[in-house]
Amino acid sequence: MPEYLAPGVYIEEIEIGAKPIEGVSTSTAGFLGLTERGPTDPRLITGFEQFQRLYGGFIQDSYLAYAVDGFFRNGGQRCFIGRIVKSDATRAHVTVDPITFEAPGEGGWGNRVAVRIENASLDRADLFKLTVAYWKNNLPGDLSAPADPKETPKKVRTLLADAQVVEVYDNLSTVPTSSDYYLSKLGKPKGVSNLVQLTSSGEERPANNTDPLFTVLADGDDGTDLTRSEFLGDPAAAPGERIGLTAFTELDEISIVYCPDLHSLDESNRNQLIDDIVSHCENLKDRFAILDALANTADIPGLRPPKDSKYAAFYYPWIEVFDPLTKGAKKVPPGGFVAGIYARSDQERGVHKAPANEVVRGASDVEFKLTKGEQDILNPRGVNCIRAFPGRGIRVWGARTTSSDTLWKYINVRRLFLYLEESIEEGTQWVVFEPNDEKLWARVKQTITQFLTRVWKDGALMGTTPEEAFFVKCDRTTMTQDDIDNGRLIVVIGVAPVKPAEFVIFRIAQWAGGSAVTE
């Protein structure tokens, strides 16, 4: 309680009424897969160009780049990339005393990274200039210095012109208190470089490159074994050092999970990983999994979702896209494109709109052209078909989860509840440790009611009035005295979600005219 000890006028700020609940994002995806290069801890990506800068481009042994490209083409705006590496892969590194340069992720790609150290533009003994280059295919054959030292700048420029990525850091300082201190800017593990991480055993600056002109990192290896374990990551790893699906548990922003490269695994590892991904979503209860069928699956009578869950959706068949590697067509799993459609539909209409009857941007064809009769078999099983319609393009033509529970058979209903649950959870954290009495109950009820009223006005709930759309109870009927004595505040909420018009039926009959037809 405030104290009033001397006469005077006191101004106090108090809180009354409801607190606003801000809706959470529903369109941030998490992708797991193999990349050309890059770090293994998850990184936020906001465009495909950024993905290419950090992780490289398209590679033959992975569908991840195609999935991320399809995500952004179809309206996605944010995703986290969890780079997967094989279990026995190693990082490339080199030491230029006293600095050790290490690639930020495992793989033989690091053996094509080279560093050049020169005097800084500012002529000071504590400063130096660092150039880092990455050649995608092979290192230049000759990194030695030319016979005439005057030709060195020209040869360096020629070498860098052939590099895919070049990073230049000038006036790096060896003074720890400097704003340009090299370990602050490039140190392991969160430096600004996409190609190297630095550690140091001393405070002096490294010597300039003379001959060869660049010092190349070495001993990086791609490894040989790829199993389910690499995609999972090590649950025992320290926070901040986790990778794979385990690292995604630390990222509350993720609401869609997809792993295109599970198709690279054998059947046993693949099935286990699918179970892991779906279980991940079921346990966290704030995200949704996208699954897709195997390539060349022509057995329609035998095709079923691999997992019964209200936290997953299953798509078939694969789609055909332009492949920048071969300059021709390539069949890829559709999940990344579908994740982008989820994001586009959420942004344009809302999470309550079923992400179906939407054009798959970037798809030139489908692996199998399905008929209505074939979809009649697949749709009741929870297989969402991707179909090519003459004059209407390639569209997602299904909106069901893989659940056998009819209450949760629609994707938009499941994802709407994820949105409501997480929004209410995050928006009512202020309630914890407040006095658990009638005043608090009234504020909580008012807070949630105002939020749900806005959701209803957005078209996410049924009913012509808020009373028909939802109810909120928080009083003596929802809590016993034992609940109150044990610090429990219980709110009961009921909502009437909108369902998609999956079957549109027009009944037409002949009419003789002149009078209305009544039944």
Image (cartoon, helix red, strand yellow):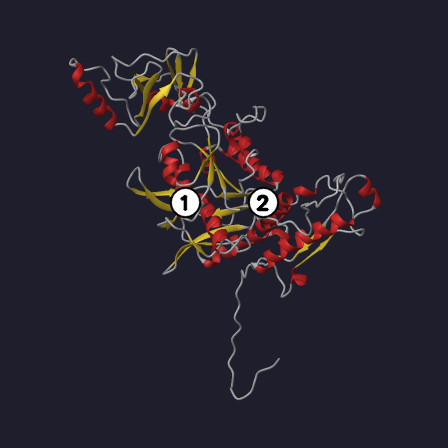
Where residue 340 appears, as percent x and y from the top left, is 45, 47
Locate the C terminus by quadrant. bottom right
Please tell me in which quadrant of the rendered image residue 139 appears: top left
Seen from the viewer's position, the closer of residues 114 and 73 is 114
Please report the residue visible at 64 percent of the width from the left and 47 percent of the height from the top. 424
Where residue 452 appears, as percent x and y from the top left, is 63, 55
Q: Is residue 443 above or below residue 432?
A: below
Please tell me in which quadrant of the rendered image residue 503 appears: bottom right
Residue 299 visible somewhere in the drawing: no
Seen from the viewer's position, the closer of residues 49 and 294 is 49
Find numbered disc 1 in the image and state the secondary structure of the residue it sits on.
helix
Residue 131 visible somewhere in the drawing: yes
Left/right of residue 327 with respect to residue 513 in the rendered view: left
Between disc 1 and disc 2, whose residue precedes?
1
Left/right of residue 316 with respect to residue 331 in the rendered view: right
Q: Is residue 80 above or below residue 409?
A: above
Mark 1 → mark 2, Cα distance in angstroms: 23 Å
Residue identifier under label 2: 311
Seen from the viewer's position, the closer of residues 397 and 478 is 478
Circle 1 or circle 2, nearest the eye: 1
Q: Amino acid at mark 2?
A: Tyr
Residue identifier under label 1: 72
Where residue 189 appears, as percent x and y from the top left, is 46, 23
Where residue 153 appears, as percent x and y from the top left, is 21, 21
Q: Is residue 70 above or below residue 183?
A: below
